[in-house]
Amino acid sequence: MNILNASILAMHRALEKLQTKKSLHIEQILVDGNRFKKYHNIPHNTIIKGDGIYMSIAAASILAKTHRDDYMTNLHMDFPQYA
């Protein structure tokens, strides 16, 4: 599996968790980039540099990056030899 398909799979898994946690009705999926694979029958739009156009994409990008940074900091505490 390449990085693009892994990213799309991760997005699909995140969407599944949204639906099970909140019983949400997703009307549309906005994707920052130029590729996405259909998720059920939900319409989607791919937007190149979408974080500079849509505040919702920018906010999601900030949340994802801060979560990743926290995750990596915690990993470093457990495995400092991999610095």
Image (spheres, rainbow, N blue to C red):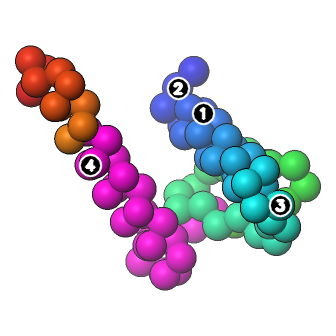
Residues under labels 2 and 1: Cα distance?
A: 6 Å
Could you tell whether 20 is left or right of 66 in the image? right
* Residue 48 visible in the snapshot: no
Disc nearer the start of the sequence (2/4): 2
Q: Nearer the viewer, mark 2 or mark 4?
A: 4
- Magenta segment range? 46-72
What's the distance in space between the residues labelled 1 and 4, CA to CA? 23 Å
The kind of residue tagged 1 is Asn
Residue flagged by tag 2: what amino acid is it? Asn
Q: Earlier in the sequence, mark 1 or mark 4?
A: 1
Characterize the local packing of mark 1: few (<14), some (14-19) or many (20 or more) Cα atoms within 10 angstroms: few
**31 to 59, vertically: above or below:** above
Q: Are marks 2 and 1 in contact (CB under 8 Å)?
A: yes
Please say whether residue 44 is one of the residues in the magenta stretch: no
Q: Earlier in the sequence, mark 3 or mark 1?
A: 1
* In the depicted structure, whether residue 28 falls above or below residue 78: below
Residue named by callout 4:
69
**Disc 2 versus disc 4: distance between alpha carbons?**
23 Å
Residue at the far right in the pictured view: 41
Looking at the rendered image, the disc whose residue lies closer to the viewer, 3 or 4, is 3
Relative to 82, residue 46 above or below? below
Find residue 2 and name its label: 2
